[in-house]
Image: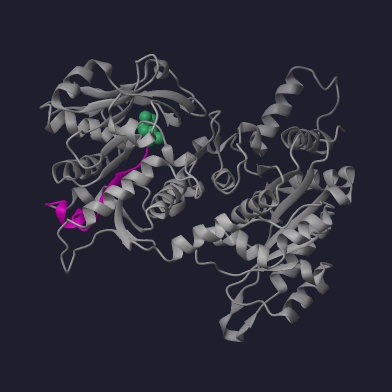
């Protein structure tokens, strides 16, 4: 097999349970390698059968992260892009479904010349070839295997990892296994057995991890590290304790303190400098001690119970707060509940800003329209993203332009006033997977608009994921009513941004700016939105006892 020149591989597997931060651990490894001056890329292998997560409910799988090239990917790719400078594409995330799809298509074309197609070697070869292709040209490729060791689904991926480790040689690959060391209150003890068992599972598949990252909610004493090391054939200095951190951006610093990156580079025979983590330290310091206090932002959406559904958005708001030295207190407000109250002020008046994020389907739309109206009329900073822009346009058409029946075709297919309708290219499309307007597209900002001032440029490029758009037949009436269409596609046919000139901050965008915000390079729209929230917080009436319908997850 062709070996990507010089590339070293870090395979990241998970044990015991999911949701212990394997993705963040992989992202932190990327950050640490970059801080040592190395070029990295990230790959995520997902064992489920969906061809991509685009068709999966955010309830089940969290947000769908969109790359520049329009791939709908796992939310871990968002962590990777936020923690490193790696710019990822559809090649950086693939699922069992995609692998089988490719292998079966080749088989149908006769490319296997009569062979019997099997998991080993055909499926594993396909996995290995894709990993090698993406890894070419970088110093370190960090490959995360989704799921937990022991799942039936992940077996072909782990087998591919085992084979790659043999083929590439041990000085070129390292396996980092992320496990949980639970504290059992009844025994007043940390228990290492689950970790021992999960490493045994890996060993049974022919993979001996060299490094363990142990998630633990308190200090992991040296004797327990030694015990874990003995039972798992791992050197004690390679048993890394990952205790809870004050914010996720502290993770690279904490893992460095535990010697993780040193262990990786030593085992991979990489000569590199000590990592420079100044940026990370500054970020954490500003986050933990925000000089300007805090602002309260309402996120009016449908998936209010799972914070992973709006992962990137949550982070982008945090970044906006960071650059204003503010903590952003984010409350998720269920848009359906806004329909149940007589006066939305009873729910929304305690916030310094209101954000209506992206979403699909007709549930809760009217609640979002009510939230927009409240923000517009009371001059509360408002930011509408994708569906949020669409609801802002519906609201404006109804209550300012006097088109009281204005609606979106997504909710009312036969509406008489489709101010938001299907893009011509979307009509007649039946397949749901990968058929939206996806990925980065250019947009031209109107001279003198607030948007162009915020961006500091007139041509921007942002990532999209939608089927519907502003109906051009209504553009004139919207503009006459005072809504500025401040961003349009270069051919002028698609409205990409709207704003209200006589409002402290009322901006809607058809794209998702949250996908491009990073802790060290916060997105300007979020910076300005949070800045407006701060200004508004100084003037808004503060009541002592506030009724609440929302639930805080911060
Ligand atoms: N459902 C809307 C559309 O498809 C908005 C999508 C979104 O918010 N990402 O256009």
Where is residue 29 drawn, in percent x and y? 67, 54
Which residue range is magenta in the image? 343-359
In the drawing, does residue 301 fall left or right of residue 312? left
Q: Nearer the viewer, residue 1 or 259?
A: 259
Quadrant location of the C terminus? bottom left
Q: Is residue 354 magenta?
A: yes
Where is residue 375 drawn, in percent x and y? 20, 44
In the image, ligand 1 is in what quadrant? top left
Instruction: Using the image, determine if residue 464 lies above or below residue 80.
Output: above
Residue 477 visible in the current orientation: yes
In the drawing, does residue 169 fall left or right of residue 150? right
Quadrant location of the N terminus? top right
Q: Is residue 250 magenta?
A: no
Where is residue 216 drawn, in percent x and y? 61, 71
In the drawing, does residue 473 fall left or right of residue 123? left
In the drawing, does residue 379 fall left or right of residue 534? left
Instruction: Using the image, determine if residue 189 lies above or below residue 501.
Output: below
Instruction: Using the image, determine if residue 230 lies above or below residue 25.
Output: below
């Amino acid at each position: 097999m062709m070996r990507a020149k010089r590339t070293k591989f870090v395979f990241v597997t998970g044990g015991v349970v999911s949701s212990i931060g394997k993705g963040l651990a992989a992202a932190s490894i990327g950050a640490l390698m970059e801080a040592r001056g190395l070029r990295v890329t990230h790959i995520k292998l997902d064992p489920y059968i969906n061809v991509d997560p685009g068709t999966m409910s955010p309830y089940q799988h969290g947000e769908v992260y969109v790359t520049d090239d329009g791939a709908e990917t796992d939310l871990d790719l968002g962590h990777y892009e936020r923690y490193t400078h790696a710019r990822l594409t559809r090649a950086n995330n693939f699922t069992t479904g995609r692998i089988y799809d490719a292998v079966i298509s080749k088989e149908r074309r006769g490319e296997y010349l009569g062979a019997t197609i099997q998991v080993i070697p055909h499926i594993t070869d396909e996995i290995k070839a894709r990993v090698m292709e993406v890894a070419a040209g970088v110093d370190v490729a960090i490959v995360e295997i989704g799921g937990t060791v022991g799942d039936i689904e992940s077996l072909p991926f782990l087998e591919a990892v085992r084979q790659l480790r043999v083929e590439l040689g041990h000085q070129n690959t390292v396996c980092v296994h992320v496990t949980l060391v639970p504290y059992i209150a009844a025994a007043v003890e940390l228990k290492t057995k689950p970790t021992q068992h999960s490493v045994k599972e890996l060993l049974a598949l022919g993979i001996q991890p060299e490094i363990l990252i142990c998630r633990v909610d308190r200090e992991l004493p040296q004797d327990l590290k030694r015990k874990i090391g003995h039972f798992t054939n791992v050197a004690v200095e390679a048993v890394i304790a990952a205790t809870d951190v004050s914010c996720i951006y502290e993770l690279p610093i904490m893992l460095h303190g535990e010697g993780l990156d040193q262990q990786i580079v030593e085992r991979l025979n990489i000569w590199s400098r000590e990592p420079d983590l100044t940026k990370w330290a500054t970020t954490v310091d500003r986050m933990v001690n925000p000089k300007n206090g805090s602002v309260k932002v309402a996120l009016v959406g449908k998936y209010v119970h799972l914070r992973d559904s709006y992962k990137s958005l949550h982070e982008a708001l945090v970044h906006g707060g960071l650059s204003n030295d503010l903590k952003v207190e984010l409350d998720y407000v269920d848009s359906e509940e806004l329909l149940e109250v007589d006066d939305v002020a009873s729910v929304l008046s305690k916030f310094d800003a209101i954000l209506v994020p992206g979403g699909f389907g007709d549930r809760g739309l009217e609640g979002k329209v009510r939230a927009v109206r409240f923000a517009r009329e009371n001059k509360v900073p408002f930011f509408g993203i994708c569906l949020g822009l669409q609801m802002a346009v519906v609201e404006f058409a109804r209550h300012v332009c006097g088109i009281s029946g204005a609606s979106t075709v997504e909710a009312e297919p036969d509406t008489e006033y489709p101010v938001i309708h299907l893009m011509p290219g979307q009509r007649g499309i039946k397949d749901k997977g990968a058929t939206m307007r996806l990925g980065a597209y250019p947009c031209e900002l109107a001279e003198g608009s607030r948007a162009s001032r915020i961006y500091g440029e007139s041509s921007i490029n942002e990532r999209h994921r939608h089927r519907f758009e502003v109906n051009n037949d209504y553009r004139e009436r919207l503009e006459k009513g005072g809504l500025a269409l401040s961003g349009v596609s270069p051919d002028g046919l698609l409205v990409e941004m709207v704003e209200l000139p006589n409002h402290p901050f009322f901006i809607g965008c058809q794209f998702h700016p949250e996908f491009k915000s990073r802790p060290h390079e916060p997105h300007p729209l979020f910076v300005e939105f949070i800045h407006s929230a701060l200004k508004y917080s100084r003037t808004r009436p503060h009541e002592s006892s506030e009724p609440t319908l929302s639930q805080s997850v911060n």
